[in-house]
Image: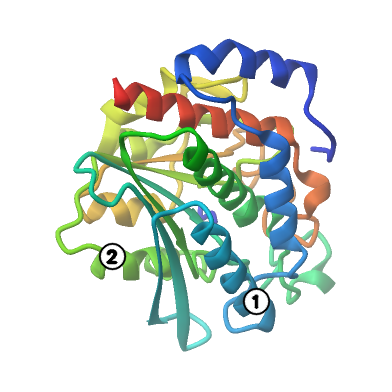
Amino acid sequence: MAACGSTGTSTASEAAVNDSVTAMAGRSPFDSSKAMELTRQQCEFGPRVPGTPAHAKCADWLMSTLQASCDTVIMQTGTVQTATEGSLGIKNIIGIINPEASQRLLLLAHWDCRPWADNDPDAANHRKPVMGANDGASGVGVLLQLASQLKADKTTLGIDIVLVDAEDMGVDDNEESWALGTQYWASHPHVQGYKPVFGILLDMVGASDATFTREYYSTQYARGFVDLVWNNTAGSHFINAQGGAVTDDHIFVNRAGIPCVDIIDMRSDSPTGFCPEWHTVHDTMDAIDPATLGEVGQTLLNVIAALEQ
């Protein structure tokens, strides 16, 4: 398989989760409502398909949003070869917190949208672009809000937030056609000899009924760090059980020698292995739940707190 709810306010259960982990994290609980708004703002540009005006405008917005929170922000540009569209210009956007810190945590999410809703039940939609509220924007929204909170609630860690492009240009049966921005970054890291402690990838982290199991390749490459993440989870969407395998950005990070864990919504009862909105025109804000964003964001804060000890 290749990756890439309801809209509302914070729930009582989400508030209880936040209250229970604040002391562990030693800082303010993750603000799910702001992560929701940052997810929505990406979708307001339209589908962020590489090469389109919406993609270019969103890239500028991502840069300015990270610049408000990070010590250094880099736009990494390059050219990749797609399976169906020829050469493609990409923009990886990198926010760096505490650049002088030697102990570093890598956090990733893809920010592009799939050009084709080829999993849509209506064949008339198969050549339409995907809005990518869940498949892309949700993970980015969480990371943008995390950066904002870490500006106020300082961390001793170095944090590198890498928003990768062209994840979703892939085709079936061609693993190398996916995660093109990550493959480019892995070959051209933003710091020579870059070696964080490990990385965490967020992908499709916004659905109300999301299930986050231990992804197979994450366990194969980075079992100890999977344990660290699942020992610090912040809600019931995280299930402490072995899940399936997915071709995603983390594979190419792991192959570059950086252990990387994928937090991704996978469904054992789905024919695609993912949520029903995956690669359809229905991947819109209607499918995003702030409570799920909150669980994922708080889990990241908990992991950061554990690494600080």
- Hey, what amino acid is under mark 2? His
Seen in the picture, residue 3 relative to 154 is either above or below; the reply is below
Figure quadrant of residue 256: bottom left
Residue 8, given in percent of the width and then of the height, sits at 85, 36
Q: In this view, does 185 lie to the left or right of 146?
A: left
Q: Which residue is drawn at 65% across and 36% down?
A: 293
Give the number of the disc on residue 263. none
Q: Residue at x 69, y 67 (%)?
A: 118
Q: In this view, does 212 lie to the left or right of 284?
A: left
Figure quadrant of residue 289: top right
Residue 276, given in percent of the width and then of the height, sits at 73, 46
Q: Is residue 307 left or right of residue 174?
A: left
Q: Which of 60 and 230 is in front in this view?
A: 60
- Hey, what amino acid is under mark 1? Lys
Q: Nearer the viewer, residue 99 or 125?
A: 99
Q: Nearer the viewer, residue 112 or 74?
A: 74
Label 2 CA crowd tier, 10 Å (few <14, some 14–19, many 20+):
some
Mark with earlier residue (1, 2): 1
Q: Which residue is drawn at 38% across and 34% down?
A: 155
How far apart, in angstroms, are the residues tagged by discs 1 and 2?
Answer: 23 Å
The residue that mark 1 highlights is 57
Figure quadrant of residue 225: top left
The residue that mark 2 highlights is 190
Residue 102, given in percent of the width and then of the height, sits at 19, 43
Q: Is residue 123 left or right of residue 232?
A: right
